[in-house]
Structures are given as structure tokens and as C-alpha cells.
Image (cartoon, helix red, strand yellow):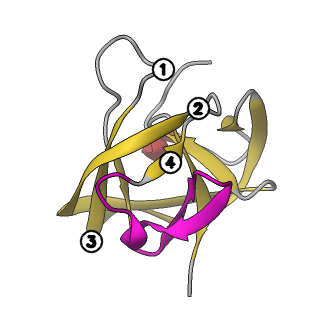
């Protein structure tokens, strides 16, 4: 399979959740095409991708993202220079984090609790 928009995911789909690891979507915490919300847009510089830069990752402030050291932190903790884990296990550097408004809210759940979005390993869950 290839890359598809998160809005197109369905229960039962097999998705990339880590380096060469796939898992099944079993439910959604959020799935709303019309919800307008506040998000963070995370831009990364990847040394492992020779083509165009990956599209930015957009997620809620509280959604967890995998950083260097194999720890998950809330997206709100990311800063320029933070280092996140890519789909292939390599490390990418955050080059900017923007506050945006966007339409749509999606939180697919997998048994592993992770999902790869725009090349970056993130969690299906949020921090409290």
C-alpha cells in the first residue's frame, strides 16, 4: 500500500505504525470531517529522504509524538531542534512548529497505540 489521507482510514485497515511494522485500525477516538480546531503543524528536516521534504505533521497540542530516546511527549513540547522518529527508525529534526486552525479531527486507534503520519511516528493517544 501507499500513502492515503487519514480521513480515508477505515476500521480494519492495516497501517504503518513503526519501522516495517503494520497494525490494524480497530476504532477511532475522533473521526469528524467538519470539526474546526486548533492544531500544531510540525515541519521536520529528514536526512533520509532525498526527494522533496515530507509534508508537515498536524496534530493536537496534547497528542503524543515519539522523540529521540524512544519517549513519547505531547506535541506542545516540540520546539525547533527537537528530534523525532521517522517511519524508518531514523531521526528527523523539527525545523518549525506553527499554531494553525484546520478542519477535521481524526484519532485512529491501533493495538500498538502508534501510527505513522506524514513519515513521523506518533501515538494514537493524548496526554493528560
- Residue 125 at x, y percent in the picture: 61, 69
Q: Are marks 2 and 4 in contact (CB under 8 Å)?
A: no
- The residue at which mark 2 appears reads as 90
Q: Secondary structure at mark 1?
A: loop
**Front position among marks 2 and 3:** 2
Q: Secondary structure at mark 3?
A: strand
- The residue at which mark 4 appears reads as 84
107 or 112: which is nearer to us? 112
Residue at left 41%, top 71%?
A: 77
- The residue at which mark 1 appears reads as 48
- Residue 113 at x, y percent in the picture: 72, 59
45 or 102: which is nearer to us? 45
Q: Residues within 10 Å of mark 1 (few under 14, many from 20)?
A: few
- The residue at which mark 3 appears reads as 37
Q: Is residue 84 visible?
A: yes
Residue at left 65%, top 62%?
A: 71
Q: Quadrant of the C terminus?
A: bottom right
**Which is more N-terminal, label 1 or label 2?**
1
- CA gap, disc 2 and disc 4: 8 Å
Label disc, if present, on residue 93 of the rendered structure? none
- Assess whether residue 75 is covered by the magenta stretch: yes
Q: Residues within 10 Å of mark 2 (few under 14, many from 20)?
A: some
Residue at left 65%, top 33%?
A: 89
Magenta residues (range): 60-81
Task: Write down the quadrant of residue 85 in the picture.
Answer: top right
111 or 84: which is nearer to us? 84
Amino acid at each position: 500500500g501507499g500513502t492515503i489521507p487519514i480521513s480515508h482510514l477505515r476500521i480494519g485497515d492495516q497501517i504503518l505504525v513503526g519501522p516495517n511494522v503494520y497494525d490494524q485500525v480497530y476504532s477511532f477516538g475522533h473521526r469528524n470531517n467538519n470539526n474546526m480546531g486548533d492544531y500544531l503543524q510540525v515541519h521536520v528536516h529528514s536526512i533520509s529522504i532525498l526527494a522533496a521534504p515530507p509534508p508537515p505533521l498536524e496534530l493536537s497540542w496534547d497528542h503524543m509524538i515519539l522523540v529521540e530516546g524512544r519517549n513519547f511527549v505531547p506535541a506542545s513540547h516540540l520546539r525547533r531542534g527537537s528530534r523525532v522518529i521517522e517511519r524508518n527508525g531514523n531521526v528527523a529534526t523539527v525545523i518549525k512548529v506553527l499554531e494553525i486552525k484546520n478542519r477535521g479531527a481524526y484519532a485512529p486507534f491501533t493495538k500498538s497505540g502508534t501510527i505513522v503520519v506524514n513519515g513521523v511516528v506518533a501515538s494514537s493517544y493524548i496526554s493528560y
